Image (tube, helix red, strand yellow):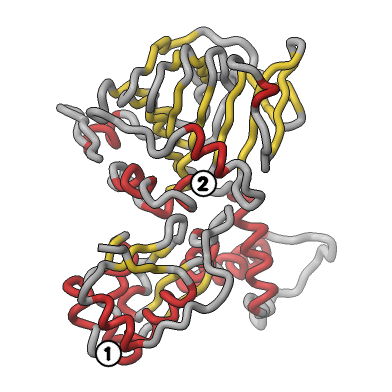
Amino acid sequence: MQLELGALTPEIFIRDYWQKKPLVIRQGFNNFKDLLTPEEMAGLACDEIVESRRVYKSEGEWQAEFGPFESYEHLGESDWTLVVQALNNWLPDAEKLIQCFDFIPRWRFDDVMASYATPGGGVGPHIDLYDVFICQGSGRRRWRVGDRGPHKEFAAHPALLHTEAFDPIIDVELLPGDILYLPPGYPHDGITLEPSMSFSVGYRTASAKDMVSALADHLIDSELGCEQIEDPDREVSQQSGRVNATDLARIKAQLLATLDDKLVSEFSGRYLTNSKCELDLPDEHLGFQCDDVLDMLNQNELTRLGGLRALYFDTSVSQGSFYINGEEVTFPLELADAIPVLCDNQMLSATSLAPWLSNQTFIEKLTDWINSGYWYFEES
């Protein structure tokens, strides 16, 4: 799978469109094939650990139901949509789609959402708070996109936040292989014209409120930020109820001193590599030994589990620090150069890992990850 941008290079896209304005990319994918069939998608939605929902209208009122689902026959042949979140956690082929957009770093990546809709199906006019590339698969879907503005939102259903009617700045019919890019804040509405599938590659960040709340939990759990304000140079106060500018500066300095690069990267690394959805991990330790891993690497490549997040920071990678699935990992300094190889690549081979395969610490850690299901051997 290859993204075809023509004269629109990734650099031009980032400069002119990313988080700035919507864009229709005609035939961004040549001969695009659905990542899975509607039947396979329905099968995923039968699993209770897969996040799925159905959206439809009943007697003119919007309805939303959350999976798992056992049957679809009662919904008829029109006016309903099935959505599966985090398709990349369950379908290895979804990684090929994500890689097409790797000119955006993975820490910004959210998930791949799959949508199957019957004619007339949609989820209603709404506004998203994230960037998304909507990749049209089989079938056709009409999209209307409005401009940013003070659009009034309302609950069409407890699980559906819709927006009022808007004048479109884009009114387009997407065909297989077409892509619609939407930055946050633009109202949009998609209506399916014939049975169709689409695959949305989403990018989001957490709000400052959510990050500060999680950071507070991290400080408490790790017993950090316990230092008290010290003010041995204090002057005599003439107004006991007053917090003067100097004292306000002390309070602010105390808070900012806590947020040094080490703390922020440690917290952010854990926070950003936590998967919001279940991962397809084995129920028990797989039992591979280090020698098994070395032998198998000579025959097969290792694939990172879909949905598993692995990140490193410029400020700490040289010290051997990086993050996998919400946990900090610290390598000896001689293994620091292996970290970008592990985190930047979905596939690992004996060739790419060759500089570290004679290091026992590295092999033991790699074996632990394989036994936990973080990486698995791709069959030849």
Q: CA distance from mark 2 to mark 1?
A: 35 Å
- Residue 250: image x %, image y %? 63, 68
Depicted 374 relative to depicted 139: above or below: below
Is residue 227 or residue 189 the one in the foreground?
A: 189
Residue type, numbered disc 1: Asn
Residue 157: quarter of image: top right
Residue 284, given in percent of the width and then of the height, sits at: 56, 75
> Looking at the rendering, which quadrant does residue 304 occupy?
bottom left
In this view, the residue in front, 45 or 39, is 39
Q: Earlier in the sequence, mark 2 or mark 1?
A: 2
Q: Quadrant of residue 162?
A: top right
Q: How many labels were placed on the picture? A: 2
Q: Position of residue 173 (x, y in %)?
A: 39, 12
Whether residue 302 can be seen here:
yes
Residue annotated with mark 2: 86
Q: Residue at x 31, y 63 (%)?
A: 378
Query: Residue at coordinates 27% horizontally, 21% vertically from top-left?
Result: 26
Residue at 60 percent of width and 55 percent of height: 211
Look at mark 1 in the image and give the residue it sits on.
359
Name the image quarter holding the C terminus: bottom left
From the viewer's perspective, is residue 19 above or below residue 60? below
Identify whether 88 is placed above or below 165. Answer: below
Query: For the residue marked with disc 2, what is the amino acid?
Result: Ala
Q: Indicate whether 246 appears above or below 23.
A: below
